[in-house]
Image: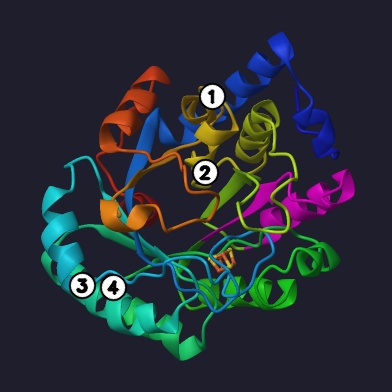
Amino acid sequence: MVVSDSFSNCLKLSGAEQRRFHRQAEEARNERFGNRVFVRGVVEISNFCRENCGYCAMRRDHTGLNRYRLSVDEILNEVVPNLPDFVTDLNLQAGEDPVAVREIAIPLLKILKRETRLGLSVCLGTFRESDYAALREAGADYYVMKVETGNAEHYKSVQAPGSLDERVAAIRQLSAAGWMVSSGFVLGLPGQTDAILTETVELLKALPLAGCSVSPFIPGENTRFSDHPAAGLDEVLNMVAGLRLLMPGRIIPAVSAMSLAGEGGYAGALRAGANLATINLTPERARGDYQIYRRERAIMTSELVLREIESAGCVPSEVGIRDWLAA
Ligand code: SF4
């Protein structure tokens, strides 16, 4: 089976055909990466955000949310010493919060670069060129910058941050400056049509990316889309397989929201060709307030992630993303 021009055909696969499709993607992953899965820790350093995305409970106008910023000391004392040894990479994530970039991410990255061998990635939003340069200088080299959808009108209608053009320009700018960049989109976002889906995947394929992701739409509480249905698990897993077959050399994550989309979603993504798992390391006191979806999130602990990796017939990679891509 091949991935046709119409991604909607792939999304509908079920039963034996679906298993064959996923196996094909798994083989494509194994050909490039073996059955090794990169394991990255994520710390959600701040839930302040200056953007106002229609699908996100962390948007700036949601005044009912308890806002927090972690301190550098808290992360160094509580998170870093407890990192499992199979975690090779660390991702600092936040809403779009310039204060968190300046006062948490940059000083923390400098220390982590000096004192650890971790690959350092960030998912912090769109900033000025000088801010990206400061983050890179501090030690990060992998930037996660999602496009959410590849259609400019659709992007505007869901109030994604800034404009699609700006987002795409930022990805190209980061890549040209030497960053490894990962992007991705939301499957099942309200208003998404087959044509928009095709446009989105084509855009991601054309961009200079090291990584690519699909996240299932999960209706966020306190958003204008709270009654919109969530994406179906089969469709999401079929999309993971489709991305792997279209972009065999890219880092494709199993995202925690796949567990919310349906039982077995996480391991299913690894069986469908994903090769990155993420452990949530945000301290307990803050986790519940990082509401990209809803208060009851699927929190991937190290035990859970190891179990899912094993059940998918994979093993944690001993080599981190940066060293793998540099080899
Ligand atoms: S999706 Fe990101 S940029 Fe948009 S409101 Fe939520 S945290 Fe902010």
- Label 3 and label 4: CA atoms lie apart by 15 Å
Q: Position of residue 227 (x, y in %)?
A: 74, 46
- The residue wearing badge 4 is 139
Q: Are marks 1 and 2 in contact (CB under 8 Å)?
A: no
- The residue wearing badge 3 is 72
Q: Residue 27: which numbered mark, if any?
A: 1
Residue type at the position of mark 3: Val
> Which numbered mark, 4 or 1, is in the foreground of this view?
4
Residue type at the position of mark 4: Gly
Residues drawn in magenta: 182-207
Q: State yes or no: residue 91 in magenta.
A: no
Q: Secondary structure at mark 3?
A: helix
Q: Examine the rendered structure and indicate whether residue 235 appears above or below residue 109.
A: above
Residue type at the position of mark 2: Ile
* Residue at 37% in and 39% down: 300
Q: Residue 252: which numbered mark, if any?
A: 2
- N-terminal of the pair, mark 4 or mark 2, is 4
Q: Are marks 4 and 1 in contact (CB under 8 Å)?
A: no
- Label 3 and label 1: CA atoms lie apart by 41 Å
Q: Residue 44: which numbered mark, if any?
A: none
Q: Examine the rendered structure and indicate whether residue 179 appears above or below residue 191.
A: below
Q: Position of residue 151 (x, y in %)?
A: 81, 62
Q: Secondary structure at mark 4?
A: loop
* Residue at 14% in and 57% down: 78
- Quarter occupied by the N terminus: top right
Mark 3 packing: few (<14 Cα in 10 Å), some, or many (20+)?
A: some
